[in-house]
Image (spheres, grey):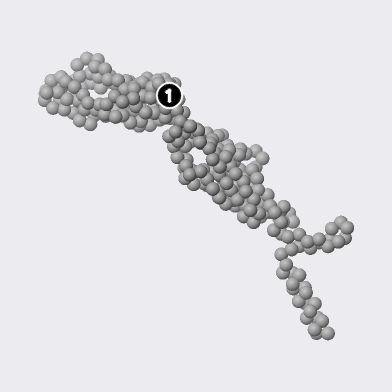
């Protein structure tokens, strides 16, 4: 009798340790369902989100929304969140942020998109995997190519020791662009080095100017009128334009 009871206990313990769940179907026969069945997993984009990123050539995000990913496992009505894993990304994307923002809902966002110095658009995919089911999900990413907007610098002598610096672009700028141009001035008695003029080209215009007046400065006061100047390569100090890239037509 004790041997029969021991055998019964072992059978019960074995049946409790299995990873499968048994139940009777509508016909009364025994069926078995594994909790690792991939049908229990959900991994897809949230219905109202986009499934592609758009960036300008400078790496700024253009789209108005970001992809939301739903990722979870459903076992008998109980939901278990599963954070997606990053499998691959374009080499020109530094890293990918994957953060949970709600129950079973995650955002996936590129962090640090390199500037596209080519005039051609480039595209790639961010590939995610759901652990447990090994389901895969990809998010497209497109970055616009740059459009060059050339800058011409001109210096005009208005009258003695009084200069106007003008910057002109090929196309009207889409946001304020600030340019700084370094230069030296000199006369027979000496020189003033490392001077800088700042020029602002306002949004929707293609020309900006700035005036530098050296009348009364020590160089002119003690040594007479300026005889000449040396211009150096300018710099884009700041820009609110995310449409164009800028380069200078050589003037120095």
Residue 66 visible somewhere in the drawing? no
Q: Is residue 164 something one can see in this rendering? A: yes
Label 1 sits on residue: 173
Residue 55: x percent and y percent?
51, 35
Residue 166, percent from left and from top:
32, 20
**Residue at horizontal 83%, vertical 62%?**
30
Q: Left of 252 or right of it: where is 2?
A: right
Counting from the top left corner in percent of width and height, residue 71 is at 64, 49
Which residue is pictured at 73% across the width and 60% down the height? 34
Going by the picture, which residue comes out furthest to the top? Answer: 159
197 over 76 or under it: above or below: above
Q: How many numbered discs? A: 1
> How far from the left and from the top, in percent, is residue 110?
51, 43
Density class for disc 1 (Cα within 10 Å; few <14, some 14-19, many ≥20) is many
Look at the picture and state if 198 lies above or below 87. above
Choose top left, top right, bottom left or bottom right for residue 63: top right
Query: Quadrant location of the N terminus?
Result: bottom right
SS for dot 1:
loop
Residue 125 in which image quadrant: top right
Please state which of residues 111 and 214 is positioned toward the viewer in this rendering.
111
Tell me what residue is drawn at x 46 percent, y 31 percent.
119
Instruction: Locate the C terminus by quadrant.
Output: top left
Q: Is residue 2 above or below residue 193?
A: below
Q: Residue at x 23, y 18 (%)?
A: 162
Task: Please tell me whether residue 57 is drawn above or below residue 31 in the rendered image.
Answer: above
């Amino acid at each position: 009798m004790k041997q029969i009871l021991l055998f019964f206990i072992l059978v019960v313990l074995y049946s409790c340790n299995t990873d499968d769940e048994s139940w009777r179907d509508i016909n009364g026969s025994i069926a078995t369902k594994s909790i690792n069945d991939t049908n229990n997993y959900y991994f897809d984009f949230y219905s109202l989100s986009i499934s592609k990123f758009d960036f300008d050539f400078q790496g700024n995000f253009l789209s108005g929304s970001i992809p939301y990913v739903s990722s979870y496992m459903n076992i008998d009505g109980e939901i278990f969140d599963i954070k997606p894993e990053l499998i691959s990304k374009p080499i020109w994307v530094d890293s990918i942020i994957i953060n949970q923002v709600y129950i079973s809902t995650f955002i996936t966002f590129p962090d640090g998109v390199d500037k596209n110095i080519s005039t051609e658009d480039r595209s790639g995919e961010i590939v995610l995997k759901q652990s447990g089911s090994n389901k895969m999900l990809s998010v497209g990413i497109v970055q616009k190519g740059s459009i060059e907007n050339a800058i011409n610098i001109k210096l005009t002598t208005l009258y003695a020791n009084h200069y106007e610096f003008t910057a002109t672009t090929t196309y009207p700028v889409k946001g304020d662009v600030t340019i700084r141009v370094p230069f030296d001035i000199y006369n027979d008695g000496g020189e003033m080095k490392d001077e800088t003029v700042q020029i602002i080209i306002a949004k929707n215009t293609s020309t900006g100017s700035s005036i530098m007046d050296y009348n009364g400065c020590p160089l002119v006061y003690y040594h007479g009128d300026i005889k000449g100047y040396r211009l150096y390569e300018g710099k884009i100090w700041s820009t609110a334009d995310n449409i164009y890239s800028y380069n200078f037509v050589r003037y120095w």
